[in-house]
Amino acid sequence: MGDERREDPRASIDLWVEELHEQSTSFRHTGDISVGGVHLDRGFPKPIGTRVKLRFNLPGEIDTIEVAAEVVGAKVGDDEMKTRLRFIDLDEQDKTRLAAFIDKVRRNQGVS
């Protein structure tokens, strides 16, 4: 799925994300997430360069995060279908909320 460097801390998290593209909506499952993007497991990936809108709620929070994202990596194999997306327009308030959430998850998982 590429070898680009990931600069932001990531957290493995079980989270459902609503993916909107053109006239279709699908629900995808996260593998991990950072303030820079998300890795989605399951579901057929879109081509690299495709732009989508994502919506999701962090566990325990009411406010929905809505962000544009671009497909930067995809992998389809016998037993896996994965998509890596880069967030394009995550606003500062959502970025702060997401960073705090990731930090909490990483601490709970014993990751520094």
Image: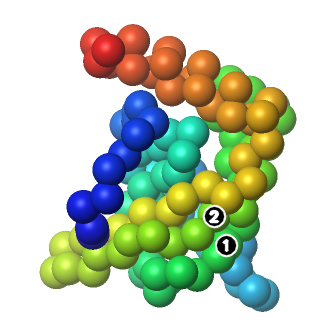
Front-lying residue, 43 or 53 = 53
Q: Secondary structure at mark 2?
A: strand
Residue 54 visible somewhere in the drawing: no
Say whether marks 1 and 2 touch (CB < 8 Å). Answer: yes
> Compared to 99, does 30 lie above or below?
below
The kind of residue on which mark 2 rests is Ala
> Residue 107's image quarter?
top left
| Image coords of residue 47 (percent x, y) | 47, 86
| Image coords of residue 57 (percent x, y) | 70, 40
| Image coords of residue 64 (percent x, y) | 79, 42
Give the Cα distance between marks 1 and 2. 5 Å
Count of picture labels: 2
Q: Residue furthest left?
A: 78
Where is mark 1, residue-wise? 52
Residue at 24 percent across and 61 percent down: it is 3
Residue at 38 percent across and 71 percent down: it is 73
Q: Residues within 10 Å of mark 1 (few under 14, many from 20)?
A: some
> Compared to 69, does 34 lie above or below?
above
